[in-house]
Image: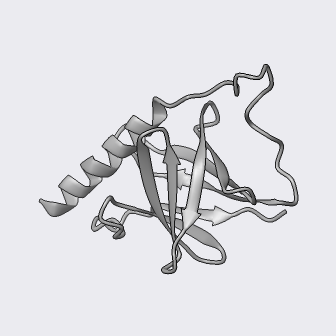
Amino acid sequence: MKKILFVAAAAVMTFASCGNKTNGNGNGTDSIADSTADSTVYAGVLPGADGSDSVTITLKSDSTFTRTHSGSQTETGKYSVDAKNILTTVAGADSDFYAMTPDSLTMLGADKQPAASGLPYVLKKVAK
């Protein structure tokens, strides 16, 4: 029962974050910058309630991020990393948590714990 509840909660968080689509920054320019040497990109396919979701997260050196779902839905916001290497992304009122290693990000629940289901919520670092 806990596994089903966690998967449902992860799906709700994923779908809730999809509503924060942004197309510009209000200055007449695109808010999505090109990947440069001062950014790190993670990508992968995450399981979801409606099938898999292709996700790319770009972390920039100015503590901002861009997250793209299935190549079309994009959100931007701020991120921080705590002493336990837990990455927190904040886009609007929504926060998501990831365990950060040198080569990957693993999506965590609101309790900052990995999915009890054992499903692979892992994004791999993309080589530059």
Left or right of 44 in this view: 52 = left
Above or below 112: residue 56: above
Coordinates of residue 80 in the picture (x, y in percent)? 56, 62
Left or right of 86 in this view: 108 = left
Residue found at the far left of this picture: 1
Q: Quadrant of the N terminus?
A: bottom left
Coordinates of residue 56 in the picture (x, y in percent)? 63, 49
What residue is at 28 percent from the left and 68 percent from the top?
Answer: 116
Q: Quadrant of the C terminus?
A: bottom right
What residue is at 52 percent from the left and 54 percent from the top?
Answer: 89
What residue is at 50 percent from the left and 49 percent from the top?
Answer: 90
Coordinates of residue 110 in the picture (x, y in percent)? 32, 58
Above or below 110: residue 13: above
Name the residue nearer the viewer: 73 or 54: 73
Left or right of 33 in this view: 16 = left
Name the residue nearer the viewer: 21 or 10: 21
Coordinates of residue 40 in the picture (x, y in percent)? 74, 61
